[in-house]
Structure formats: structure tokens, C-alpha cells
Image: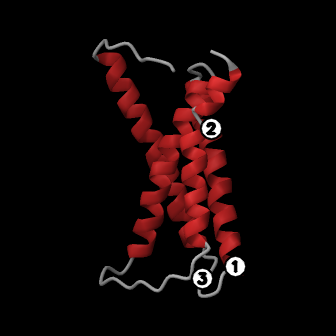
Amino acid sequence: MGSWRKLICFLPAAVYGSLIFFLSSRSLKVKFSFAYWDKAAHWTEFTILGVLLVFGFYRYFAHQTFLAFYLSLMTGLLIGLGDEIHQLFVRNRQCDWTDWLADLAGILTGCLLFWLIHRRKEKTGKPVKTP
């Protein structure tokens, strides 16, 4: 597969990561009765990012599973850290290390979800297609 076709696999992660930064640049005042709703939001958005990142890395590095997970985790951690530092400069937002931990948990969950889905496809005997 050509390198440009491999890089296209990162397009969903890039678009979604840009959306995360766009939304975190907005001053939001949302309150829910659930005490840790903001941690759940961080976890959810970074779970999706984790799946998208591991998909791109897995396709780019020709099915090298460990490398794909490692690079997805490190990239997700840096994106989460960058997002939290970015929020230092946004009015009514704050940089919180517990949000970053929720981001980490989301990235790990996304990687595990991808692995479970991929493993299930391999066990059922369905060929895993590459773009």
C-alpha cells in the first residue's frame, strides 16, 4: 500500500483531534447532576480518539500490533496533555491533571476496544481487510 494511502488512515483521527481542540477552546458552562460528568466526557472523547489512532497506526505499520498500541498511547497522551495546557489560556477553562488521567483511561479503553474487535474478527475466520 502506498504511503499516501496509509496516511489517509490517520485522517479520521486528525479531524477528530482537531474537533477536540476546537471544543476545548470554547468557554463552556455546563452543569449536570452527575458529579464526575466532565471526567466521563473526557473518557468518552478520548476513547473514540484512541480507536481512531490505533486504527491509523495499525494500518500504517503493517499490522505490528505492539507498535501500533504503543504509538497510539503516546500520541493520545501528548494530545491530552496539549489539550490541558491549551485550556490554561482559555477563559473559564482550567488545566486539570485528573482530566488528563481521564484522557489516558480513554485512550487505553479505545486501544483495548480496537484489539478486542480485531481479535474477534480473526477468531471468526473473517479476513481483516486493509485499505
Q: Earlier in the sequence, mark 1 or mark 3?
A: 1
Q: Which is more N-terminal, label 2 or label 1?
A: 2
Viewer-proximal residue among 98 and 126: 126
Residue holding disc 1: 88
- Labelled pair 1, 2 in contact (Cβ < 8 Å): no
Q: Residues within 10 Å of mark 1 (few under 14, many from 20)?
A: some
* Residue that label 2 marks: 70
On the image, the x and y values in percent for residue 72 come to 60, 41
- Specify whether 124 is left or right of 75: left
Q: Position of residue 126 (x, y in %)?
A: 32, 14
Question: What crowding class fits label 3: few (fewer than 14 Cα within 10 Å), some (14-19), or many (20 or more)?
Answer: some
Task: Give the residue type at disc 1.
Answer: Leu
Disc 3 target residue = 93
Q: CA distance from mark 1 to mark 3?
A: 7 Å
Question: Residue at position x 65%, y 38% from top?
Answer: 71
Q: Of discs 3 and 2, which sits in the foreground?
A: 3
Instruction: Tell me if label 1 and label 3 are in contact, CB under 8 Å.
Output: yes
Task: Name which of mark 3 and mark 2 comes first in the sequence.
Answer: 2
Task: Please tell me the numbered disc located at residue 21.
Answer: none
Colour option used: secondary structure
Secondary element under disc 2, as helix, strand or loop, is helix
Gap between marks 1 and 2 measured at Cα? 28 Å
| In the depicted structure, whether residue 9 falls above or below residue 33 | above
Side (left or right) of 42 relative to 17: left
